[in-house]
Structure formats: structure tokens, C-alpha cells
Amino acid sequence: MKLNIAVLAGDGIGPEIMQQAIKVVNVVCEKKGHEVKYTEAVTGAAAIDAVGDPYPDSTHKICMEADAVLFGAIGHPRFDNDPTAKVRPEQGLLRMRKQLGLYANIRPVETFPSLLHKSPLRKDLVEGADFICIRELTGGIYFGDKGRSDNGNTAYDTCVYTREEIERILKLGFEYAMKRNKKLTVVDKANVLETSRLWRQTAQEIAKQYPEVDTQYMFVDNAAMQLIQWPKNFDVMVTENMFGDILTDEASVITGSLGLLPSASIGLHTSVFEPIHGSYPQAAGKDIANPIAMVLSAALMFEYAFNLKEEAEMIRKAVAASLEQNYVTEDIDKTNPKKTSEVGSWLADYIKKNF
């Protein structure tokens, strides 16, 4: 198969972890006889520096023409620390999601047996935890009208959802529930927010089409608490944009490291595969960042974009082996840490030797 992949390394540790993912993708393609073509494009702070736009038209064109997008990270402290900045790296990420129609972000959360002791939660709480968070990605408060009053002392962000936006993400959630354990948790704040009441009303209507699914409804504050208390009670969770952003980052601690979780953003055009962590600028250029989430995002790419499940499983088995053998970066093992590049090379060598 010919694989046409757009590569958006982005900012901070993005370029370093992307290099490791490409090492792994190259070995997998070599093993399975695939022909892979990479087209690099700029985004985020790097794109602002280069062309003054965090998601230029040239980058969008490359994404639209690709079969899949591997994306690293966006963000830089000079923008984080300047609330008055008119052009920001994150605007590029939001625009990419909107223009590619990426309405669903899928984040699998599962624990690794060899890392249970690294989780801040008790072993009996997290052992066997395995669920999927499906976050609506192109609506809600992140995309609503926003601004400040003339004197700058009043600010507003508007949360808006249409029934169509809610229906398509909920149907995706129900379909995933049907493929897994037929259990779906819809997270909202319907006791306070009108948008959440539309979410719950729509979910109740769609649930009738899926009588086999045990559909549960949970306020977001309760969901945040239960994620930590009983993570194994969840199987498929679906929620709106901001709630999903917060809850999935919270869920990442269950595994023991934010550097382990990948994600897939799917929708109307080219799908994007990215780690859930940020740009981690403090580690940029130091060869210390954990590349595993980026590598596992490549595994999701093989599975979701190309329907190549064997290739995805090769990568996941290599990652599991690296964790079992404690060949990991400093976020997991501070006593004997390996470099970002060393972990990437180890994963590639494992695949080359074992498959």
C-alpha cells in the first residue's frame, strides 16, 4: 500500500518525538511492504515565525492532499505569557480542526501492567482500566464568539452547539459502545447549562436507537471525581469540547504518565493523529521527552486511516516490551532514564528483530 502522510512536527518537543515516530513507521512499512511518502509542513509558533500564520494555507493544502496527518505539538511560552498576543499558536490548532472537519477526538486510556506502580492511584483501582474518551472537537466554547468590552474589564466566551453537531458525535459514541462493552457515559452539565440540556435531550432520543447500550448520564463534576475513584467503571465516554479537554487530561494520570496516551481526530476530511500532551517547551532540544504517545499515535494512524491493524499491533507490542524492560525516558524512570532518540531506536529495532 502507498501511504501519503503529512508531517506537522510543530513546536517544543514536537520535532524530537516526531522523529521517533517516523523511525517506527519506516520499519513497519519496510516489514510489511508499504511505500510511504512524507510531506512536512509548518504549524503553530514555528509557522508564526516562518510566515506569520499558525496554520497557513500551504499547510492546509498538504493536509487535505494527504491520507493522514501525524501531528506533534503546538505552543510556546512567549505566547502563553502574553495575554495581549493577537496571533497565537493554538489558533492554528483550532483552525486545523475546523477546516479539516475534525469533529471527534478519540482518546483510548488503558493501563500498562509494568507501570501500575507509577500511577498516583492505588493498583487495585487502575489495574485493568480500559476505556475510550470521545470528545467533540469543533464546537462549544472554544469556537463561540469571544471578546472584551471597550475598556477591557469585561470578557466573554460563548458556548454554542447545534443539534447536528451533537447528534454526529453521540452517534459515534454509541457505535463505539456497540463495538466494545455496550456501555456509554454521556457527560454534561445539564443542571446548569442550556447547551448541556440540548446534549442530554439529544442523547436520550438517540439512545432509543441503541437499546442494547447501557446509557448513563453524568454531570461533569461527578465524572471528574469518578474517573479518579472508579476508572474501571467507564468504557466509552462522550462529551463536549471543553469538558473533554479537561477530563481526558485528568484521565491521563491513570496510566502513570501524560507521555503515554495517543489520540485520533477524525471527521470530514483527513484524520489527524497526535499525542495528548503539549509542547513541553522546557524539554525542547534536550532529548529527554517521552516519545511513546507520539509512536502510539502512529499506531492509531495505521489502524484508523489505513485499516492496517497488524501494523498497529506491531507498534503496540513494541511499546509494551519497552515498558516491561524499563527502556523508558525520565518521566517514567528517573534513576536510569533513556534519551528520546534511544527509545525511538529501541522500538524500531524491536520491530525489525521480532516481526
Image (cartoon, helix red, strand yellow):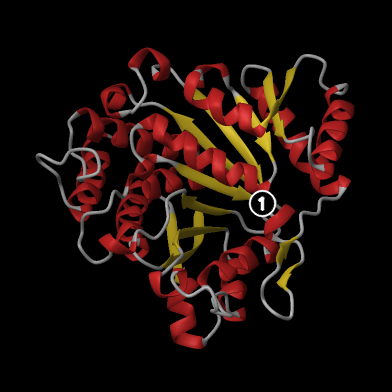
Q: Amino acid at mark 1?
A: Leu
The residue closer to the viewer here, 352 or 76, is 76
Please provide percent x and percent y for residue 36.
43, 59
Q: Is residue 100 above or below residue 81?
A: above
**Is residue 307 in view?**
no
The quarter of the picture where the C terminus appears is top left
Residue appearing at x 71%, y 71% in the figure: 147
* Closer to us: 184 or 123: 123
Quadrant of the image occupied by residue 166: top right
Q: Quadrant of residue 93?
A: bottom right
Q: Kindly identify the residue that appears in the image at 21 percent across and 38 percent down.
A: 353
Q: Exactly how many numbered labels are in the figure?
A: 1
Image vertical order of residue 216 relative to residue 27, above or below: above
Near-viewer residue (8 or 315): 8
Q: Position of residue 242 (x, y in %)?
A: 64, 48
| Residue 175 image point, x, y percent | 72, 29
| Secondary structure of residue under mark 1 | loop
The location of residue 286, given as percent across then percent down, is: 20, 62
Question: In front: 29, or 42?
Answer: 42
Q: In the visual, does 204 lie left or right of 140?
A: right
User: Which residue does the numbered mark 1 point to in the structure image?
Assistant: 137
Q: Which residue shows up at 20% across the image and 59% down it?
A: 287
Please tell me how crowded label 1 is: few (under 14), some (14-19), or many (20+) other residues with Cα within 10 Å: many
Q: Quadrant of residue 135?
A: top right
Q: Against 173, is 304 above or below? A: below
Residue in the image at 78% along x and 38% along y: 192
